[in-house]
Amino acid sequence: MWWNTFLNIIESNTLQNVLLGISLIVALIIGVRQISLNDVVELYAIEGDGSVLIQNVGTRLIYIDKYIFNGKVYLTDSQILPPTYANAGAFYYVNLPGRDNPENHISIEVFYHDLDGRPWKSLIEGDKETTRWKIRTLPRTPAKNKQ
């Protein structure tokens, strides 16, 4: 008796509809995941002429809310920083300590948000090596809230 029910399901469109529904759900999940992989927010910093040049190497427009330079807070009023693929020359400049300044280490914590309002932070560190600065950018992390 159960065999007849099974055969009826196979012969009807019910099984095909169930498999079609499952394949559509899987395709939707894969599509959403692919979009999230392509949707990147990331900063990168290099040394410029007396400045740290901060560049948006992600794929989304970001808004810099503030940064903390060696413990001091600097508000930026949501300064826009376009991604490099849209404007390769777009940088946010942070001045380095002058030559007479004895500091030989810097720490810059940048707080920003993307178009969806998701808050992020990136840590940039630098050490003075004779006359130049060696700048490192750590991977971004989610910020607790838009600071």
Image (cartoon, rainbow, N blue to C red):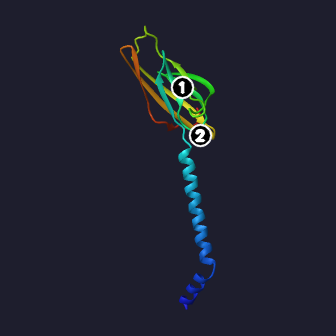
Task: Single out the residue that lies furthest toward the left.
Answer: 130
Tell me which residue sits at (55%, 45%) in the image. Answer: 38
Decide: few, some or many residues near mark 1? Use Cα within 10 Å; few <14, some 14-19, many ≥20.
many
Mark number for residue 67?
A: 1
Residue 57 lies, in percent from the top left, at 52, 34
Decide: few, some or many residues near mark 2? Use Cα within 10 Å; few <14, some 14-19, many ≥20.
some
Cα–Cα span, label 1 and label 2: 16 Å
Q: Quadrant of the N terminus?
A: bottom right
Mark number for residue 78?
A: none
Considering depth in this image, is 14 or 138 the residue closer to the camera? 14
Mark number for residue 118?
A: 2
Secondary-structure class at tag 1: strand
Q: Quadrant of residue 125?
A: top left
Amino acid type at mark 1: Tyr
In primary-sequence order, the first of circles 1 and 2 is 1
Task: Single out the residue that lies furthest toward the bottom.
Answer: 1
Residue 129 lies, in percent from the top left, at 36, 18
For residue 93, side relative to residue 12 (left or right): left
